Amino acid sequence: MKGTAKAHTNIALIKYWGKRNDALILPTNSSLSLTLDGFYTKTTVEFRRDLSSDLFLLNDQAVSGQAYERVSRFLDLVRKLSGEENIYAEVNSRNEVPTAAGFASSASGFAALAAASTRAIGLELSDEELSILTRQGSGSACRSIYGGFVEWQMGEREDGLDSRAVQVAPEDYWDVRVAAVELSSTMKKVSSREGMKRTVDTSPFYSGWLEAIPNDLMQLKAAIKEKDFEKLGAIAEANCLKMHATTLGANPPFTYWHDTTVRVMHAIQEMRSKGIPVFFTIDAGPNVKALYLPEHEEVVKSMLENIPGVTSVTLSRTGKGISYL
Ligand code: ADP
Ligand code: DP6
Ligand code: CO
Protein backbone atom coordinates (compact mmCIF):
# COMPACT_ATOMS: atom_id res chain seq x y z
CA MET A 1 0.00 0.00 0.00
CA LYS A 2 2.58 2.48 -1.21
CA GLY A 3 2.49 5.34 -3.69
CA THR A 4 4.86 8.06 -4.88
CA ALA A 5 3.91 11.20 -6.77
CA LYS A 6 5.47 14.41 -7.98
CA ALA A 7 3.65 17.74 -8.22
CA HIS A 8 4.84 21.18 -9.29
CA THR A 9 4.04 24.47 -7.63
CA ASN A 10 2.00 27.07 -9.43
CA ILE A 11 2.06 30.84 -9.45
CA ALA A 12 -1.29 32.60 -9.36
CA LEU A 13 -1.78 35.32 -11.98
CA ILE A 14 -5.23 36.00 -10.56
CA LYS A 15 -4.92 35.28 -6.83
CA TYR A 16 -7.04 33.14 -4.55
CA TRP A 17 -7.45 35.34 -1.50
CA GLY A 18 -10.21 34.42 0.94
CA LYS A 19 -12.44 31.54 1.95
CA ARG A 20 -16.21 31.33 2.19
CA ASN A 21 -15.94 27.99 4.02
CA ASP A 22 -12.78 27.33 6.07
CA ALA A 23 -13.37 23.61 6.68
CA LEU A 24 -14.00 22.65 3.05
CA ILE A 25 -11.67 25.35 1.68
CA LEU A 26 -14.22 26.99 -0.59
CA PRO A 27 -12.90 30.28 -1.99
CA THR A 28 -14.63 33.65 -2.26
CA ASN A 29 -13.23 34.11 -5.77
CA SER A 30 -12.05 32.09 -8.75
CA SER A 31 -8.31 32.22 -9.53
CA LEU A 32 -5.95 31.39 -12.41
CA SER A 33 -2.38 30.13 -12.25
CA LEU A 34 0.59 28.91 -14.22
CA THR A 35 2.16 25.59 -13.18
CA LEU A 36 5.96 25.89 -12.84
CA ASP A 37 8.44 23.31 -14.02
CA GLY A 38 11.28 24.50 -11.77
CA PHE A 39 9.72 23.90 -8.34
CA TYR A 40 8.16 20.71 -7.10
CA THR A 41 7.49 18.25 -4.29
CA LYS A 42 7.97 14.48 -4.35
CA THR A 43 6.03 12.53 -1.77
CA THR A 44 5.86 8.84 -0.88
CA VAL A 45 2.99 7.54 1.25
CA GLU A 46 2.93 4.06 2.71
CA PHE A 47 -0.11 2.83 4.68
CA ARG A 48 0.98 0.29 7.30
CA ARG A 49 -1.04 -1.91 9.66
CA ASP A 50 1.68 -1.71 12.33
CA LEU A 51 1.36 2.07 12.84
CA SER A 52 -0.90 3.55 15.52
CA SER A 53 -0.65 7.11 14.17
CA ASP A 54 0.58 8.88 11.03
CA LEU A 55 4.25 9.81 10.61
CA PHE A 56 5.30 12.80 8.52
CA LEU A 57 8.87 13.46 7.40
CA LEU A 58 9.62 16.58 5.38
CA ASN A 59 13.11 16.83 3.89
CA ASP A 60 14.20 13.95 6.20
CA GLN A 61 13.02 15.73 9.37
CA ALA A 62 10.14 14.41 11.49
CA VAL A 63 7.41 17.06 11.57
CA SER A 64 5.05 17.70 14.51
CA GLY A 65 2.64 20.51 15.44
CA GLN A 66 0.43 22.35 12.97
CA ALA A 67 2.10 21.09 9.78
CA TYR A 68 1.74 17.49 11.02
CA GLU A 69 -1.93 18.06 11.92
CA ARG A 70 -2.65 19.43 8.44
CA VAL A 71 -1.22 16.29 6.83
CA SER A 72 -2.95 13.92 9.23
CA ARG A 73 -6.35 15.67 8.80
CA PHE A 74 -5.90 15.36 5.06
CA LEU A 75 -5.14 11.64 5.35
CA ASP A 76 -8.37 11.32 7.39
CA LEU A 77 -10.25 12.46 4.26
CA VAL A 78 -8.43 9.88 2.15
CA ARG A 79 -9.15 7.13 4.71
CA LYS A 80 -12.82 8.08 4.78
CA LEU A 81 -13.12 8.07 0.98
CA SER A 82 -11.54 4.62 0.74
CA GLY A 83 -13.49 3.08 3.64
CA GLU A 84 -10.17 2.07 5.30
CA GLU A 85 -10.63 4.07 8.50
CA ASN A 86 -8.10 2.40 10.81
CA ILE A 87 -4.84 2.39 8.95
CA TYR A 88 -2.06 4.92 9.35
CA ALA A 89 0.64 6.10 7.01
CA GLU A 90 4.27 7.02 6.85
CA VAL A 91 4.65 10.10 4.66
CA ASN A 92 8.05 11.03 3.24
CA SER A 93 8.17 14.29 1.37
CA ARG A 94 10.85 16.38 -0.26
CA ASN A 95 10.29 19.99 -1.28
CA GLU A 96 12.39 21.27 -4.16
CA VAL A 97 11.04 24.67 -3.21
CA PRO A 98 11.52 26.73 -0.01
CA THR A 99 8.83 25.80 2.57
CA ALA A 100 6.33 28.47 3.70
CA ALA A 101 8.25 31.35 2.12
CA GLY A 102 5.64 32.40 -0.43
CA PHE A 103 6.84 29.95 -3.08
CA ALA A 104 3.64 27.88 -2.88
CA SER A 105 5.08 24.83 -1.08
CA SER A 106 1.57 24.09 0.17
CA ALA A 107 0.43 23.80 -3.47
CA SER A 108 3.03 21.25 -4.62
CA GLY A 109 3.02 19.66 -1.14
CA PHE A 110 -0.68 18.87 -0.94
CA ALA A 111 -1.03 17.98 -4.63
CA ALA A 112 1.78 15.41 -4.25
CA LEU A 113 0.31 14.13 -0.97
CA ALA A 114 -3.15 13.75 -2.49
CA ALA A 115 -1.86 11.86 -5.52
CA ALA A 116 0.50 9.60 -3.55
CA SER A 117 -1.94 8.80 -0.74
CA THR A 118 -4.92 8.01 -2.96
CA ARG A 119 -2.71 5.78 -5.09
CA ALA A 120 -1.32 4.04 -1.98
CA ILE A 121 -4.75 3.30 -0.53
CA GLY A 122 -6.06 1.98 -3.86
CA LEU A 123 -8.45 4.76 -4.84
CA GLU A 124 -8.82 5.48 -8.53
CA LEU A 125 -9.88 9.09 -8.88
CA SER A 126 -10.35 11.18 -12.00
CA ASP A 127 -8.28 14.38 -12.19
CA GLU A 128 -11.43 16.30 -11.35
CA GLU A 129 -12.09 14.22 -8.23
CA LEU A 130 -8.45 14.52 -7.23
CA SER A 131 -8.58 18.31 -7.60
CA ILE A 132 -11.67 18.47 -5.34
CA LEU A 133 -9.94 16.35 -2.71
CA THR A 134 -6.62 18.23 -2.98
CA ARG A 135 -8.41 21.55 -2.48
CA GLN A 136 -9.24 20.45 1.06
CA GLY A 137 -5.54 20.22 1.93
CA SER A 138 -4.54 23.63 0.57
CA GLY A 139 -6.65 25.70 -1.80
CA SER A 140 -3.89 26.64 -4.23
CA ALA A 141 -2.94 22.93 -4.46
CA CYS A 142 -6.09 22.04 -6.42
CA ARG A 143 -4.58 23.89 -9.40
CA SER A 144 -1.32 21.88 -9.30
CA ILE A 145 -3.11 18.73 -10.48
CA TYR A 146 -2.89 20.20 -13.99
CA GLY A 147 -0.08 21.65 -16.06
CA GLY A 148 0.03 24.95 -17.92
CA PHE A 149 -2.60 27.64 -17.32
CA VAL A 150 -5.18 26.47 -14.80
CA GLU A 151 -8.35 28.05 -13.49
CA TRP A 152 -9.79 27.20 -10.08
CA GLN A 153 -13.51 27.74 -10.57
CA MET A 154 -14.90 28.74 -7.19
CA GLY A 155 -18.21 26.92 -7.68
CA GLU A 156 -21.53 27.64 -6.02
CA ARG A 157 -22.39 24.49 -4.11
CA GLU A 158 -22.16 24.31 -0.33
CA ASP A 159 -20.67 20.81 -0.45
CA GLY A 160 -17.82 22.04 -2.70
CA LEU A 161 -18.32 19.41 -5.40
CA ASP A 162 -18.15 22.07 -8.13
CA SER A 163 -15.13 23.92 -6.67
CA ARG A 164 -12.19 22.54 -8.62
CA ALA A 165 -9.48 23.34 -11.12
CA VAL A 166 -9.78 23.06 -14.91
CA GLN A 167 -7.00 23.41 -17.45
CA VAL A 168 -7.24 26.56 -19.57
CA ALA A 169 -4.22 25.74 -21.80
CA PRO A 170 -1.60 22.96 -21.58
CA GLU A 171 2.06 23.53 -20.68
CA ASP A 172 3.25 23.49 -24.30
CA TYR A 173 0.68 26.06 -25.46
CA TRP A 174 2.81 29.14 -24.79
CA ASP A 175 6.42 29.48 -23.65
CA VAL A 176 6.01 32.07 -20.90
CA ARG A 177 8.96 32.11 -18.48
CA VAL A 178 9.09 32.85 -14.78
CA ALA A 179 12.11 33.95 -12.75
CA ALA A 180 11.74 33.26 -9.04
CA VAL A 181 13.58 36.05 -7.28
CA GLU A 182 14.55 34.97 -3.78
CA LEU A 183 15.44 37.43 -1.08
CA SER A 184 14.40 35.43 1.96
CA SER A 185 13.81 31.71 2.40
CA THR A 186 12.80 31.98 6.07
CA MET A 187 9.25 30.99 6.97
CA LYS A 188 6.81 33.88 6.82
CA LYS A 189 5.31 35.24 10.04
CA VAL A 190 1.74 35.18 8.74
CA SER A 191 0.75 32.00 6.86
CA SER A 192 -1.40 32.29 3.75
CA ARG A 193 -4.26 30.76 5.71
CA GLU A 194 -4.07 33.22 8.58
CA GLY A 195 -3.37 36.19 6.31
CA MET A 196 -6.39 35.68 4.08
CA LYS A 197 -8.66 35.02 7.05
CA ARG A 198 -7.63 38.22 8.81
CA THR A 199 -8.13 40.15 5.59
CA VAL A 200 -11.61 38.73 4.89
CA ASP A 201 -12.69 39.35 8.50
CA THR A 202 -11.31 42.87 9.00
CA SER A 203 -10.10 44.68 5.86
CA PRO A 204 -12.48 47.36 4.50
CA PHE A 205 -10.67 46.97 1.15
CA TYR A 206 -11.77 43.36 0.78
CA SER A 207 -15.01 44.21 -1.03
CA GLY A 208 -12.98 46.14 -3.64
CA TRP A 209 -10.86 43.06 -4.20
CA LEU A 210 -13.90 40.90 -4.85
CA GLU A 211 -15.44 43.47 -7.21
CA ALA A 212 -12.30 43.47 -9.38
CA ILE A 213 -12.08 39.72 -9.93
CA PRO A 214 -14.62 39.01 -12.72
CA ASN A 215 -13.06 41.57 -15.06
CA ASP A 216 -9.45 40.59 -14.24
CA LEU A 217 -10.29 36.96 -14.88
CA MET A 218 -12.03 37.68 -18.17
CA GLN A 219 -9.16 39.89 -19.41
CA LEU A 220 -6.52 37.37 -18.40
CA LYS A 221 -8.29 34.54 -20.21
CA ALA A 222 -8.51 36.74 -23.30
CA ALA A 223 -4.76 37.51 -23.05
CA ILE A 224 -3.99 33.77 -22.88
CA LYS A 225 -6.21 33.08 -25.86
CA GLU A 226 -4.62 35.88 -27.92
CA LYS A 227 -1.11 35.11 -26.58
CA ASP A 228 -0.86 38.79 -25.76
CA PHE A 229 2.01 38.86 -23.27
CA GLU A 230 1.84 42.56 -22.40
CA LYS A 231 -1.81 42.18 -21.56
CA LEU A 232 -1.18 39.06 -19.47
CA GLY A 233 1.63 40.73 -17.54
CA ALA A 234 -0.23 43.96 -16.91
CA ILE A 235 -3.30 42.17 -15.56
CA ALA A 236 -1.28 39.78 -13.38
CA GLU A 237 0.80 42.61 -11.90
CA ALA A 238 -2.25 44.75 -11.16
CA ASN A 239 -4.14 41.82 -9.62
CA CYS A 240 -1.19 41.07 -7.34
CA LEU A 241 -1.06 44.70 -6.18
CA LYS A 242 -4.78 44.67 -5.40
CA MET A 243 -4.39 41.54 -3.29
CA HIS A 244 -1.47 42.93 -1.32
CA ALA A 245 -3.32 46.23 -0.83
CA THR A 246 -6.06 44.43 1.12
CA THR A 247 -3.58 43.33 3.82
CA LEU A 248 -2.74 46.94 4.68
CA GLY A 249 -6.36 47.52 5.64
CA ALA A 250 -6.56 44.46 7.91
CA ASN A 251 -6.67 44.64 11.70
CA PRO A 252 -3.94 44.28 12.81
CA PRO A 253 -2.48 45.48 9.50
CA PHE A 254 0.31 43.52 7.84
CA THR A 255 2.28 43.20 4.65
CA TYR A 256 4.29 40.33 3.17
CA TRP A 257 6.73 42.75 1.54
CA HIS A 258 10.31 43.37 2.68
CA ASP A 259 12.41 46.35 1.61
CA THR A 260 14.02 44.26 -1.14
CA THR A 261 10.57 43.20 -2.39
CA VAL A 262 9.81 46.82 -3.23
CA ARG A 263 13.28 47.31 -4.75
CA VAL A 264 12.67 44.35 -7.10
CA MET A 265 9.23 45.66 -8.06
CA HIS A 266 10.72 49.06 -8.96
CA ALA A 267 13.57 47.49 -10.93
CA ILE A 268 11.08 45.48 -12.99
CA GLN A 269 8.95 48.54 -13.73
CA GLU A 270 12.10 50.49 -14.62
CA MET A 271 13.15 47.78 -17.05
CA ARG A 272 9.73 47.93 -18.64
CA SER A 273 10.04 51.66 -19.17
CA LYS A 274 13.15 50.84 -21.23
CA GLY A 275 11.12 48.61 -23.51
CA ILE A 276 11.66 45.12 -22.03
CA PRO A 277 8.29 43.43 -21.38
CA VAL A 278 8.76 42.05 -17.86
CA PHE A 279 6.15 42.01 -15.11
CA PHE A 280 5.99 40.89 -11.48
CA THR A 281 3.65 38.94 -9.28
CA ILE A 282 4.02 38.10 -5.58
CA ASP A 283 2.25 35.44 -3.51
CA ALA A 284 1.85 35.52 0.27
CA GLY A 285 5.52 36.11 1.04
CA PRO A 286 8.38 38.54 0.33
CA ASN A 287 9.79 36.83 -2.77
CA VAL A 288 8.95 38.02 -6.28
CA LYS A 289 8.25 36.21 -9.52
CA ALA A 290 9.11 37.96 -12.77
CA LEU A 291 7.20 37.04 -15.93
CA TYR A 292 8.96 37.42 -19.28
CA LEU A 293 9.35 35.83 -22.74
CA PRO A 294 12.29 33.56 -23.78
CA GLU A 295 13.98 36.22 -25.93
CA HIS A 296 14.50 38.43 -22.87
CA GLU A 297 15.81 35.75 -20.53
CA GLU A 298 19.47 36.86 -20.46
CA VAL A 299 18.78 40.52 -19.83
CA VAL A 300 16.06 39.88 -17.25
CA LYS A 301 18.20 37.40 -15.32
CA SER A 302 21.24 39.65 -15.10
CA MET A 303 19.16 42.67 -14.12
CA LEU A 304 17.47 40.70 -11.29
CA GLU A 305 20.72 39.18 -10.01
CA ASN A 306 22.27 42.60 -9.66
CA ILE A 307 19.61 44.01 -7.35
CA PRO A 308 21.07 44.45 -3.82
CA GLY A 309 19.38 42.03 -1.38
CA VAL A 310 18.51 39.38 -3.97
CA THR A 311 20.01 36.04 -2.89
CA SER A 312 19.12 33.91 -5.93
CA VAL A 313 17.27 33.93 -9.23
CA THR A 314 15.84 30.61 -10.44
CA LEU A 315 14.44 30.37 -13.95
CA SER A 316 11.44 28.23 -14.73
CA ARG A 317 9.33 27.20 -17.67
CA THR A 318 5.71 26.15 -17.64
CA GLY A 319 5.27 22.82 -15.87
CA LYS A 320 3.23 19.64 -16.12
CA GLY A 321 0.50 18.36 -13.84
CA ILE A 322 0.98 15.56 -11.31
CA SER A 323 2.85 12.40 -12.21
CA TYR A 324 3.15 9.03 -10.48
CA LEU A 325 6.58 7.55 -9.94
P1 ADP B 1 3.64 28.55 0.94
O1 ADP B 1 3.84 29.92 0.38
O2 ADP B 1 4.94 27.81 1.04
O3 ADP B 1 2.58 27.76 0.24
P2 ADP B 1 1.77 28.39 3.15
O4 ADP B 1 1.66 29.19 4.41
O5 ADP B 1 0.64 28.44 2.22
O6 ADP B 1 3.15 28.79 2.45
O7 ADP B 1 1.96 26.85 3.48
C1 ADP B 1 3.08 26.35 4.13
C2 ADP B 1 2.64 25.08 4.83
O8 ADP B 1 2.32 24.07 3.87
C3 ADP B 1 3.72 24.44 5.67
O9 ADP B 1 3.84 25.08 6.93
C4 ADP B 1 3.18 23.03 5.79
O10 ADP B 1 2.12 22.98 6.73
C5 ADP B 1 2.57 22.79 4.40
N1 ADP B 1 3.52 22.07 3.53
C6 ADP B 1 4.58 22.56 2.85
N2 ADP B 1 5.22 21.61 2.16
C7 ADP B 1 4.55 20.45 2.40
C8 ADP B 1 4.72 19.08 1.96
N3 ADP B 1 5.71 18.74 1.14
N4 ADP B 1 3.84 18.16 2.41
C9 ADP B 1 2.82 18.52 3.24
N5 ADP B 1 2.61 19.79 3.70
C10 ADP B 1 3.46 20.74 3.28
C1 DP6 C 1 -1.45 34.40 -2.15
O1 DP6 C 1 -3.45 27.87 -0.90
O2 DP6 C 1 -1.52 28.57 0.56
O3 DP6 C 1 -0.58 32.31 -2.85
O4 DP6 C 1 -5.85 27.23 1.20
O5 DP6 C 1 -5.17 28.12 3.42
O6 DP6 C 1 -3.74 26.43 2.26
P1 DP6 C 1 -4.70 27.58 2.11
O7 DP6 C 1 -3.87 28.78 1.43
P2 DP6 C 1 -2.92 28.78 0.13
O8 DP6 C 1 -3.10 30.30 -0.35
C2 DP6 C 1 -2.44 30.82 -1.47
C3 DP6 C 1 -2.60 32.31 -1.52
C4 DP6 C 1 -1.79 32.99 -2.61
C5 DP6 C 1 -2.58 33.13 -3.90
C6 DP6 C 1 -2.74 31.90 -4.77
O9 DP6 C 1 -1.88 31.01 -4.77
O10 DP6 C 1 -3.75 31.86 -5.50
CO1 CO D 1 0.50 28.10 0.21
Image: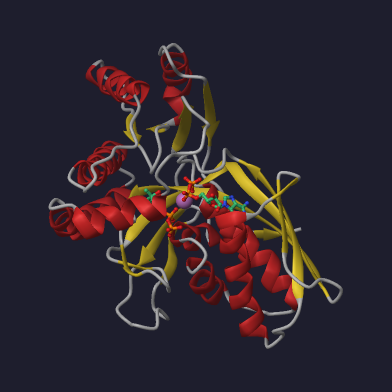
Location of residue 4 in the rendering, given as x and y in whole percent from the top left corner: 75, 60
Q: Is residue 34 above or below residue 324?
A: above
Q: Nearer the viewer, residue 193 or 102?
A: 193
As drawn, is 67 to the left or to the right of 230? right
Residue farthest toward the bottom in the current orientation of the protein:
83
As drawn, is 216 to the left or to the right of 155? left
As drawn, is 189 to the left or to the right of 137? left
Q: Nearer the viewer, residue 267 or 184?
A: 184
Q: Taking the image as drawn, is residue 284 in sight?
A: yes
Q: Nearer the viewer, residue 53 or 150?
A: 53
Location of residue 58 in the rendering, given as x and y in whole percent from the top left corner: 69, 48
Location of residue 202 in the rendering, given as x and y in whole percent from the top left corner: 20, 55
As drawn, is 50 to the left or to the right of 195? right
Which quadrant holds the C terminus? bottom right
Taking the spot 32% from the left edge, 31% from the top edge, the residue there is 279
Q: Is residue 23 above or below residue 223?
A: below
Where, by quadrant of the figure, is residue 207 drawn? bottom left
Location of residue 300 in the rendering, given as x and y in whole percent from the top left corner: 42, 20
